[in-house]
Amino acid sequence: MTPAPFGARLDDVVVRFGTRRRMTSDGTLVKDDDATALDGVDLQIRPGTITGVLGRNGAGKSTLLSLLAAFTRPTGGEVRVGPDSDGQQAWEDPWENPWVTSNVQLVRESGDLQDEEKVSESLKYYADLRPAWDSDLAGRLLDLFEVNPRKKPAALSRGKRSAVGATIGLASRAPLTIFDEVYLGMDAPTRYAFYDEILADYAEHPRTILLSSHLVEEVERLFEDVIVLHRGRVLLAETAEEMQGRGFSLTGPATAVDDLVDGRRVLHRQRLGGTVQVTLEGAPGDGERESARAAGVELGTLPLQDLFVRLTQVDADPERSRR
């Protein structure tokens, strides 16, 4: 039986990586100052949801996910994970906690495979670690992704290694399953097969799934909740539906569009000849819809990918993004 889905909670979490020394190409020894990967993160992840974890490179996504799997220890603050039982959350610190770590599966791009052993040996290793492991599912997924389990990971392409990682994550049936950029190297048919398998197995065996990806347009259909990290902080954490209500577009003659902007925060603006399209923060009101229609301006919704790009692109000073 699959355990109850795990939730997670972070309270004022800070992660800093200390000073390190490195040799440059000309033989000079230089010292890099400590870097802050996460800075005062407060976050709660609902159990039993598929949550997208989005952010630009260096935003802190991998650090956040490694905290939940006890691969990293916070410099400050508290990290707690655990199942929800009869309305009571059983929070526990994952660090050096065998019960928690046996029920959390983090799959990174590399797949964390044993390079000198056959793929089948890596699967046996994970089967011993994960109480809810499904060997039949693992075998079926390897067939689906056309991976030969008798090969060593070193003999596999990058895409096939990623497919093995995806197989491990799905077959683990862990109450908290985390995929960190696991799609890298997969071709489009394999990625879409992976997404379909996530939905199918999630429907039959509910758990909490965190999915970090830069291919937002491909995976947004999976998300129930969304977390957006920006420069080590939580920019937003809400349902996908709420995020979709954070912006809309106006497209039409420049003068008419400018009249309708009316002090709203402009996330993006582009012009082609006499036509302008602006992306505005927030949801349009009924009056704005009527005004746009009357002015011959098209009012449109935005996909999550566009919103993510715009929200992490605007200037930190809201007044500089207004007209």
Image (cartoon, rainbow, N blue to C red):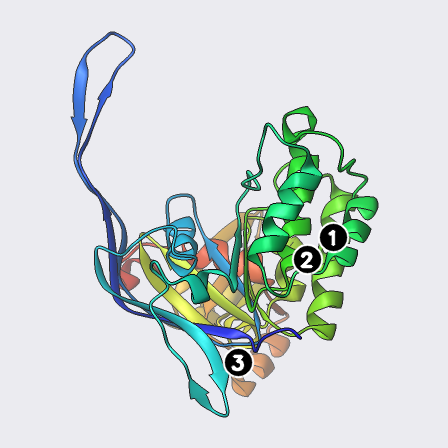
Residue type, mark 3 in image = Glu
Residue 231 percent coordinates (x, y): 32, 52
The one nearer the camera, 109 or 302, is 109
The residue sitting at 42% across, 83% down in the picture is 89
Picture quadrant of residue 82: bottom left
The one nearer the camera, 237 or 278, is 237
Q: Which residue is mark 2?
A: 171
Is the Cβ of the residue at disc 2 closer than 8 Å to that at disc 1? yes
Q: Is residue 77 left or right of residue 173?
A: left
Give the quadrant of the C terminus: bottom left
Is the Cβ of the residue at disc 3 closer than 8 Å to that at disc 1? no
Q: Is residue 321 left or right of residue 304?
A: left
Q: Which residue is mark 3?
A: 288
Which disc, if any, is residue 81?
A: none
Picture quadrant of residue 292: bottom right
Report crowding for label 1: few under 14, some 14 to 19, many 20 or more residues within 10 A (C-alpha): many
Can residue 183 be seen here? The reply is no
Residue type, mark 1 in image = Ala
